[in-house]
Amino acid sequence: MAAEAWNADFCRFVTGGSTQSLHTVMASVAGPGDTILVAANAHKAERAYALATGLNAAIVPVQIDGEWDIEHGVEPQALNAALAANPTAKAFIVVSPTYYGVTSDIAALATVCHDHGIPMIVDAAWGGAFAFCEGLPDDPLTKGADAAVYSAHKTMGALAQGSVIVAKGDLIDRQRLWMAYELFETTSPSVPILATLDATRRDHALNGEQMWNGVIALAEKVRRKIAGIAPLRVLGCDHLPPDADLDVTKVLIDVSVLGVSGYAIDDWLYKHHRISMGLSDARHILAVLSLGTTRSDLRKLVRGLQDLVNQLGSDPSILPAISPMPGIGTLSVDMAMPGPAALYGPAEMVAYEAAEGRIAAEMIAPAPPGVPRLVPGQRISAAHVAWLVANRDAGVFVMDPVDPTEATVRVVQS
């Protein structure tokens, strides 16, 4: 029934989150030593699987919006160039929508993949509801994707770790996908998670249009209200690259003009208004609206943001000022040695500030959104050092670093 609901040929419910779902789909298309193309803003899940299995994850550049300092999707010409450089690649994984709600041109990317005879896998963790409401962007399966992964727990109402794998067409061996699912799924799956996945499927199949139209109406209203709080800016459709779409229920707010970090604002909003944002970074905060969001929640958010602006206007010292931060576009990926060799070989700890030129031996993935900025085997550049130090000092949260104080990083022993 879920396969029918998502217009797929194959569906499996997963109780280990979309991390497990992505590992499963990757196992169905590539083996040790094979190459798979991965968008540069992919979640740590994809890079972790490649490290653990000896898969070569070749990075496909994404569009960088320098004005907003965020990553968007992959352009078809970038995918064509990556395939020319990696002609034996077995598949391509793209993130659409991004954490900020911005989609790639899935139809164009699927055409490029299919012209090369390989499947396209979409990490649509934040887009599971797209298939059930015309007011949301198009579901990737309707645009030619061969497989998609949805985090039904993120916005659709399932319990945490509830994820869905769907596949369509013949480019992915469904028998191999089924076997990979059986390999990775626990033999003691959580029945409550499975039950909520099925209940979520039913709710959306019957009432998705009505439910999400209500959320979209709330989102449009709160967007207008926040955009009216000078000097805050809200990411809208007029800020998108060509052929991209926006899930308006993800409300990205640029707070950089206030001269304080999004990290500090996130903490302030929680302390003074008990508001927990979906994401904060050096210059943004993100509000995620979903089926449980109420008008009261949004009134509280607007009041909190207006109070913040007023308080900073009266006394800028209430939050620490920050200097201009290095942009995300300064970062690059230069793999100096195979990831597994760096991960499992001799290593040592060095200060962040002394890491330039060294080879990373751990993954550094600030979260949200959990995109790795360093992976084992990657050469650490001066730009990485500047970006990591600045964000660390501003309050970034790194997922499970070897050194929890974030003073040192694990590198290949010299």
Image: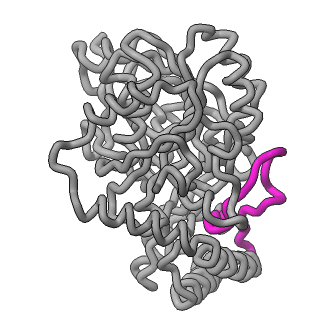
Residue 316 location, quadrant: bottom right
Q: Is residue 315 magenta?
A: no
Q: Residue at x 42, y 77 (%)?
A: 270
Q: Which residues are magenta?
A: 230-255
Q: Is residue 254 magenta?
A: yes
- Note whether residue 413 is visible: yes
Q: Position of residue 68 (x, y in %)?
A: 71, 52
Q: Where 142 falls versus 55 (above or below)?
A: below
Residue 350 location, quadrant: top left
Q: Is 250 in front, or is 129?
A: 129
Q: Residue at x 58, y 77 (%)?
A: 211
Q: Position of residue 146 (x, y in %)?
A: 58, 34
Q: Position of residue 385 (x, y in %)?
A: 48, 32
Q: Residue at x 34, y 46 (%)?
A: 399
Q: Is 243 in front, or is 297?
A: 243
Q: Is 318 in front, or is 38?
A: 38
Q: Where 160 falls versus 287 (above or below)?
A: above
Q: Where 65 falls versus 133 (above or below)?
A: above
Left/right of residue 274 with respect to residue 390 in the rendered view:
left
Quadrant of the image containing the C terminus:
top left
